Image: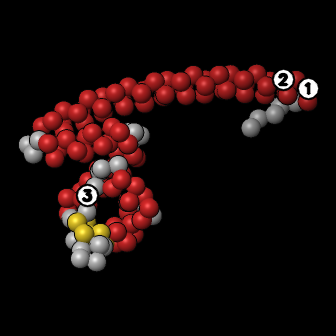
Amino acid sequence: MRTITDIAKEFDVTTRTIRYYEELGLLSPQRTNAKKRMYTNSDYAKLKLIFRGKRYGFSLEEIKEMVLLFDKDRTGKKQLERTVAYGKLKMAEIDEKMRELQEIRDELETLHLDFTEKLNSLKGGSYIE
C-alpha cells in the first residue's frame, strides 16, 4: 500500500492530480482510521494505465472507459477490445496529422528554396543556409 504522497512522487505529479482521478472515479483508495488515502497495487496499475493513455493522447473519458472495463470483466477481454478499437482510431488520427505536417513541411521547403533563390539574385552571389 502506498500513500498519496508516495504515489505523486513516483509518477512525478501533484497530489491534486491523484485526487482528481479519484473524483473522476478512476481510483478508489482505501482509507485508514485517520482518513488517510492508501493506494493498492490495483490503484497503482490503474495510474500506470492512465498516464500511458495520456502520453498516447487519449482523452480522460476514453482512459476511464478502458481502465474501468477491467473491473466489469475480470477476463480483460472487453478492456482489450476497447483498447484495440481506441488504438486504431488514435493511429488513424496520428496518420492524418503526419500527412498534414508533411504537407506543411513540403510547402515550407518550396518557399525556402524560392526565397533563397530570390535572396541570391538580390545579392548577386550565392547564399546557402
Q: Amino acid at mark 3?
A: Ser
**Depth check: 80 or 22 in front?**
22
Labels 3 and 2: the sequence-earlier one:
3
Disc 1 packing (10 Å; few <14; some 14–19; many ≥20): few
Mark 2 in CB contact with mark 1 (< 8 angstroms): yes
Q: Which is in the foreground here, disc 3 or disc 2?
A: 3
Q: Amino acid at mark 1?
A: Leu
- List x then y, in percent, for residue 20: 40, 55
Q: Above or below — where is 103 with respect to 128?
A: above
Mark 3 in CB contact with mark 2 (< 8 angstroms): no
Element at badge 3? Answer: loop
Element at badge 2? Answer: helix
**Depth check: 85 or 34 in front?**
34
**Depth check: 75 or 71 in front?**
71
- List x then y, in percent, for residue 45: 24, 57
- List x then y, in percent, for residue 119: 85, 28
Please tell me which residue is depicted at 29% across the width and 69% down the height of the picture. 37
- Which circle marks residue 28 in the picture? 3
Measured in 3D between alpha carbons, the distance from the residue under mark 3 to the one under mark 1, in whole angstroms, is 68 Å
- Residue assigned mark 2: 118
Q: Above or below — where is 27 with respect to 66?
A: below
- Residue assigned mark 1: 122
